[in-house]
Amino acid sequence: MAIKYEYSSTCCSHYYVETRNNDDAQVVTKCNICGQGEYVETNRTEIESITEPVYQAVVEAQPEDVAVE
Amino acid sequence: MSASIYSNSSFTDTPYGLKLQQTFTASSSSVVIPTGINRVYAIVIGGGGAGSTQTTGGGGGGGAGGYSAGWTYVSTSVTVGAGGTGTSTAGAGANGGSSIYGMVMAGGGSGGLNSTVSGAAGGATTPTGSTSVVSYTGAPASTAIGYASGGSAGAGNAGVSTGGGAGSATVTGTLTGGAGGRGLICGGGGAVGTAGTGTGGAGGTGDFFAGGTGSTGTGTGFGGGGGGAGFTSDGASASGKNGGNGGSGGGGGGAASTLGTAGSGGNGVVFLYY
């Protein structure tokens, strides 16, 4: 299960989101706008995680398509 | 290790007027982009390849994950490629997984193949073995220096994403493994397994983070290769015959000496700016 962490910086209140597995380290800790304040967690939500990309390419026959014998 | 705004290119090359708003190190099918924003700028990095281990001698290092960046339409799902998992089973290392957001995609790095052939770095797709693939920018596959460089028979080739260093099948004498290539995201070092003095190759040195060091000692209990630098953290150093793990953000895993445990590749990462 992945977790969506929401942060607000202590300097300019920049809203920033990291989605990562629970045991993974926070990637960005300082405000990436001004580099001054720290990111303080304001909320976390468990979300559905996917392991493989899903492609859904739907191809339908067009009127001008002609079957080849 | 966390990234600093002042030492990471994901912030210093931010397109003017944009802000880093979301970072993903895990895949998700519930990405939320604020209403009214229809295009975002994505930096997408694949997972690093694992190093290899061999029955005799040392293995080849894993390649770095691919680096892709560009504008894309908004998507509700993101895939972040996991790094290849290093094992103590003789053979090629596992490839890293591909990362995708919208229409920006980056392949994983190839696992190290065997003693003398390391893994290539990921491009737009994931390579198999030492032969690199075309990058997302359209830069061609390369056997030498390249945007996504190939694996090698010595030190890894330099590039943006780089190949791992080769190891050695020789089992006597004083030996040193090949280092991972230097670049933005780096391959792992090759390993040696010798009755003499063996030194594993260092993980590739990154522009912003360091590669791990190889281990040194006499006998096959030493000679593991260091992990390559990732996009967001250092590669780990080797320990005895075991390879070091690649840094977070696509670093390639270091190879292992004689049936040691190879280093795992670092997981990929996706940054979204808008």
Image (tube, rainbow, N blue to C red):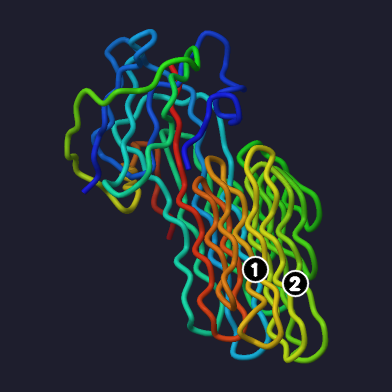
Q: Position of residue B124 (x, y in %)?
A: 57, 46
Q: Position of residue B92 (x, y in %)?
A: 56, 76
In the rendered structure, the residue with mark 2 lies on which chain?
B
Answer with left or right where residue B200 lies relative to residue B1.
right
The image quadrant where one finds the C terminus of chain B is: top left
Category of crowding for the residue at label 2, using alpha-carbon neighbours closer than 10 angstroms: few (below 14), some (14–19), many (at least 20): many
Residue matched to label 2: B177
The image quarter containing residue B254 is bottom right
- Residue B123 seen from this side: yes
Residue matched to label 1: B225
Report the Cα–Cα distance between label 2 and label 1: 7 Å
Answer with left or right where residue A50 lies relative to residue B221.
left
Kind of residue at badge 1: Gly
The image quarter containing residue B117 is bottom right
Residue B225 in the image: above or below residue A30: below
Kind of residue at badge 2: Gly
Label 2 sits on a secondary structure element that is loop
* Residue at the image point whose x is 45% and y is 51% from the top: B267
* Residue at the image point whose x is 17% and y is 34% from the top: A45
Q: Position of residue B224 (x, y in %)?
A: 63, 73
- Residue B126 seen from this side: no
Residue B231 in the image: above or below residue B102: below
